[in-house]
Amino acid sequence: MKLLGAILIMTAASLGGVLLLREKKQRQDGYRSLAAALELLRGELSSGGIPLDLGIERAYTHAKGIGKAFLSTVRDGFHDLGEHSFEEIWDKALTDTCPWLALDTQAEIRKLGGELGRFDLELQLRFLDACISYLKEQWQLQRSTYPSDRRVTLGLSFSLSALLVILLY
């Protein structure tokens, strides 16, 4: 019975480490997906001076992952545009689809939402470029630290599980 308890403790602690790593990997993929979705939006807006709602619709059709979910939420919010400002719709989409983003990243994306649709096209494209660049930097940072994070997280979870088994038995 003690052996079964020890195996369960080790499995639970190890699984906790694996799940934490999975979450970090999904966060890393989320940064990349958001940057790609905004690049699609930038491409649509720069290609012919189309309205913002049509640009979001077109970008949505080609986006993937969390970027697609974000654009979908913004797109769906356009029916509330008279009751709410575009900035409020953008903020709600960000809060609903990306609550895991770091606060500084959320602030950068919110700033973009506050500028889209307000100024001339060139200025909107510059704000999009700045936000895309920021998201790519964050993605590269997440990507570069992931291998060491993986080693530390797995090492700590396995060590913790072994320590718990030793202490409890």
Image (cartoon, grey):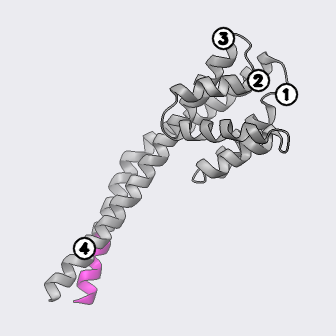
Disc marking residue 124: 2
Q: Which residues are magenta?
A: 159-169
Mark 4 vs mark 3: give the one in front.
Answer: 3
Regarding residue 120, the answer to whether it shows in the image is yes
Identify the main secondary structure in magenta.
helix
Disc marking residue 52: none
Please name whichever residue, 5 or 85, is drawn nearer the observer in this view of the structure: 85
Of labels 1 and 4, earlier in sequence is 4
Q: CA distance from mark 3 to mark 1?
A: 18 Å
Q: Alpha-carbon neighbours of circle 2 within 10 Å: few (<14), some, or many (≥20)?
A: many
Q: Position of residue 79 (x, y in %)?
A: 75, 39
Regarding residue 129, the answer to whether it shows in the image is no
Disc marking residue 47: 3
The residue labelled by disc 1 is 118
**77 displayed left or right of 98:** right
* 10 vs 15: above or below: below
The residue labelled by disc 4 is 10
Mark 2 vs mark 3: give the one in front.
Answer: 3
Q: CA distance from mark 1 to mark 2?
A: 8 Å
Give, as a three-letter code, the residue at label 2.
Gln
